[in-house]
Image (tube, grey):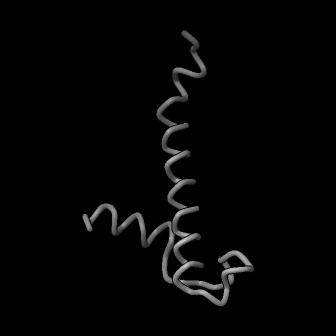
Amino acid sequence: MSPTMELLYHYFVGPPAPDRWPENLRNNPAAGHGMYSFEQGLRLGLLLATECLAPDLLNGP
């Protein structure tokens, strides 16, 4: 894993924390942490996309 990806992962996802996982996955640590990691990655991607597109969205065509 690249140093940047590792830094982002530890910042946005962090170590496994069952209280952050969906209720139905609390007994399945791999699936629970995987789902939480995916959710945080998707959220980060959408935030980055919004930030990159903001000038175009605000100024129009």
- Image quarter where the N terminus lies is bottom left
Judged from this view, the residue extending furthest toward the right is: 23
**What residue is shown at x 67% (from left), y 86% (from top)?**
26
Residue 16 higher or lower than 1, as above or below: below
Residue 10, quarter of picture: bottom left
Q: Position of residue 16 (x, y in %)?
A: 53, 84
**What residue is shown at x 73% (from left), y 80% (from top)?**
24
Q: Position of residue 34 (x, y in %)?
A: 52, 73
Front residue of 46/51: it is: 46
**What residue is shown at x 59% (from left), y 84% (from top)?**
17
Residue 26 higher or lower than 10, as above or below: below
Judged from this view, the residue extending furthest toward the left is: 2
54 horizontally vs 5: left or right:
right
Front residue of 23/43: it is: 23
**What residue is shown at x 56% (from left), y 86% (from top)?**
29
- Image quarter where the C terminus lies is top right
21 horizontally vs 9: left or right:
right
